Image: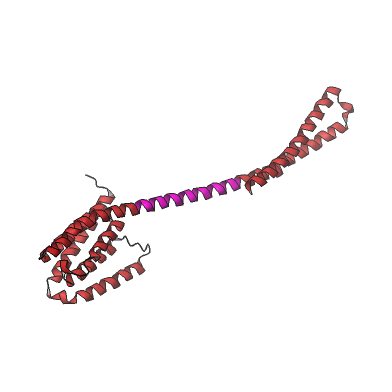
Amino acid sequence: MKFSRNFIDALFVILSLTLTALAIFFWVQSPLEKYSLQLVAFLVILFFISQKIAKDNLLAHPANLIIFTAATLLLVADTGGLESPIFFIVYFLLFGTALLASTPVVLALTILIMIFFAPSLTSTNAAIQLASLLLITPLAILFGRQYLQLLDQQGEIVLLKKTNEANEKSLAQQETNALIWLSLNLKTTLAETSETLSSLLADIAHLNSDQTKKLKIVHQQINRLLKESQKVKQLIDEETD
C-alpha cells in the first residue's frame, strides 16, 4: 500500500510532536523542572541558530514547530498549567501551526496539548481553559486555510504578471523582427526589383507594347508597395510606443 508524501510528512510531524510532548511532560515532573526557563532560553537560541544555518530560512520546517511547541509547553507548565496567566500563548501556537502545517497536524497538536495539561485540571476555570482549545482549533484551521488561499491568489497574480511581462517581451521581439523585415528584407527586395524594372523600361525598343504595358503596371505596384511598407513601419512604431 502506497502512501502520499503529504501523509508521510504529516505522520512524521505528529510523531515528533508526540515525542516532544512526552519529553516535556517527564521534564516538568522531574527534578529538572527548576531548569525549565534555562531550557526555554536554550530552545530560543537553537531556533535562531537553525534559522541562521538553514539556506531556505523557512519557518514551516518541522524542527521549528517542535521548538515552538516545546517552549510553549514549558512556559505554560512552569507558570501554573491551565491556571497560568500566559496560557493564551497556546492559542498563538495553534494559530501558528495552522499557518505552517496541515489540518491533521493541528488536530493532533490540540489533542496532545489537552492530554498534556489534563493532570492540572483541578478547577472550573481550568476546565474552561481546556475546553476552549476545542473552540480555538476550528478557528485556527479556518484562518490557516484562508491564509493559504490568499497566498495562492497572490501566487496566481504574480504568475499573471510574469505572463504579461513575457507577452510584452514577445510582442516587442515580434515588433523588432517585423521592423527588420520591413526595413531590410522587403524594402531592399522591392527597391532592387524596382531598379531592375526601371532598367528594362529604359530599353523598351526590344519589347512589344503589351510587354511594356505589363512592366509599367508591375513597376507601379512595386512602388506602391514600397510606400505602403513605409506606412506599415510607422504604424507599428506608433502602436507599440
Front-most of residues 36 and 195: 36
In the picture, measured across the screen, residue 194 lies left or right of residue 71, that is: right
Q: Is residue 165 magenta?
A: yes
Q: Foreground: 82 or 16?
A: 82
Q: Is residue 159 left or right of residue 47?
A: right
Tell me where residue 209 appears, x and y as whole percent.
86, 23
Query: Which image quadrant is residue 70 in?
Result: bottom left
Q: How many marks?
A: 0
Q: Place residue 196 in its image quadrant.
A: top right
Residue 218 place in picture, x, y as percent:
78, 30
Q: Residue at x 31, y 57 (%)?
A: 99
Q: Is residue 9 something one can see in this rendering? A: no
Quadrant of residue 220 in the image?
Answer: top right
| 94 magenta-colored | no
Residue at (67% x, 45% y) in the render: 179
Q: Is 187 drawn above or below residue 151 in the view shown?
A: above
Q: Position of residue 106 (x, y in %)?
A: 24, 56
* Quadrant including the N terminus: top left
Query: In the image, residue 232 lies at what x, y percent?
Result: 69, 40
Q: Name the one closer to the observer, 85 or 160.
A: 85
Outermost residue toward the right in this view:
205
Tell me, yes or no, if residue 202 can be seen here: yes
Q: Is residue 213 above or below residue 188?
A: above
> Quick one: 72 or 208, which is closer to the camera?
72
Where are the magenta residues, as a range?
A: 148-173
Residue that appears at 28% across and 71% down: 44
Query: What color scheme is it?
Result: secondary structure
Q: Residue furthest front?
A: 124
Q: Is residue 94 above or below residue 44?
A: above
- At x 76% / y 35%, what residue is drawn? 224
Q: Main secondary structure of the magenta part?
A: helix
